[in-house]
Image (tube, rainbow, N blue to C red):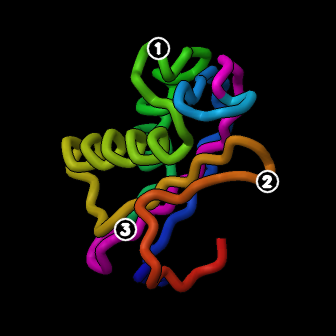
Amino acid sequence: MLNTDSLRILDLGEISCSHRIAWYKGKCSNIHGHNYRIKLYVEGDNKAWLDFVNLSSVAKEVIMKYDHKDITTKFGIETAEQFAERLYNEIKEKYEEKKIPFKEIYVEVWETSKFGVLYPYESTCKRNI
């Protein structure tokens, strides 16, 4: 569960990507695009102060490599769930490399203003997003 006393919420903005879901029976099996909105929740350890600017700039380095790319062809990503998991793993790795103190991160990927995913999702997560 998140410790909201040490939580930073970052809206990393939008990136434009195309993708397709080959196994899906419907229009999403065709190549199409989204302006994905990416949000990041960083839970710090209570001993360290988390710098918004540093957190944001490191995370944006990761997400910008996907901007204006076909994420299915180039990265093997078909779904928003896969995209959120990939961003989570890459941002977490970058934070660890740069020795940014954190307990956990959570990534939201919004395909539209109505549909998004959270990774990792815990059924015990007791917050309103």
What amino acid is found at the position of numbered circle 1 in the picture?
Thr
Q: Is residue 113 left or right of residue 21?
A: right
Q: Which element is circle 2 on?
A: loop
Q: Which quadrant of the figure contains the C terminus?
A: bottom right
What amino acid is found at the position of numbered circle 2 in the picture?
Lys
Q: Residue furthest right?
A: 113
Residue that mark 3 sits on: 49
Residue that mark 2 sits on: 114
Residue 64 vs 89, above or below: the answer is: above
Residue 46 vs 101, above or below: the answer is: below
Q: Residue at horizontal 55%, vertical 15%? A: 69
Q: Which quadrant of the figure contains the N terminus?
A: bottom left
Q: Residues within 10 Å of mark 2 (few under 14, many from 20)?
A: few
Q: Residues within 10 Å of mark 1 (few under 14, many from 20)?
A: few
Residue that mark 1 sits on: 73
Q: Identify the magenta region.
A: 29-49
Q: Residue furthest front?
A: 25
Q: Residue at horizontal 55%, vertical 16%? A: 70
What amino acid is found at the position of numbered circle 3 in the picture?
Trp
